[in-house]
Amino acid sequence: MDPAIVSAMAAVLGSLVGGSATVATAWVTQKTLSKRELISAEIRTRQTLYGEFIRECSKLVVDSFTHTLDKPETLLPAYEVLNRIRLCASAAVLGEAEEMLKRLTEQYSLPNLSVEEIRKLVQARGPDPLKSFGEACRVELKSMRAAV
């Protein structure tokens, strides 16, 4: 073979390898960034959703201590958020959310509590009825962040 042809072929092949390596690197980088952006957006969405549930249930917890459930539609906002949680949450988060609404419904069916009875209840059960839900959410979101 002619040495000039061999040199030209080596130059062309070297350029192709170098160019394809650059393209492959750019493609992998873009794919990784897209995945990170999607996961970050999903984390933000879930944080907002879980925050809504906590806000709704916090209001209802306080209300359930001093009122009976005269209007079932009082629970409607919490059930609406629960069903949105059902669309995307892990089984642990969903289970805690369902348990929270079960406890709320039970509390509404009990007699109203005085301030002293509420104080005793808080001492017996702990100050935060949404703690287990929040912990399940934290574990889920932490595992999602680890995937990024």
Image (cartoon, rainbow, N blue to C red):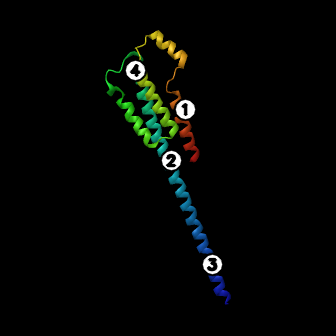
**Left or right relative to 80: residue 16:** right
Name the residue that disc number 3 marks: 11
Residue 120: give x, y in percent of width and height: 51, 12
Question: SS for tag 4?
Answer: helix
Which residue is nearer to you in this view: 48 or 75? 75
Residue 55: give x, y in percent of width and height: 43, 28
Name the residue that disc number 2 marks: 39
Residue drawn where x is 50% and y is 54% of the image: 34
Q: Amino acid at mark 1?
A: Glu
Q: What whole-number distance in Å separates the C-alpha atoms at marks 2 and 3?
A: 42 Å
User: First in sequence: mark 2 or mark 3?
Assistant: 3
Residue drawn where x is 50% and y is 36% of the image: 93
Name the residue that disc number 1 marks: 135
Q: What whole-number distance in Å separates the C-alpha atoms at marks 1 and 4?
A: 24 Å
Which numbered circle lies on residue 108? 4
Q: What whole-number distance in Å separates the C-alpha atoms at marks 4 and 2?
A: 38 Å
| Pointer 4 local density, CA inside 10 Å: few below 14, some 14–19, many at least 20 | some
Which numbered circle lies on residue 16? none
User: First in sequence: mark 1 or mark 2?
Assistant: 2
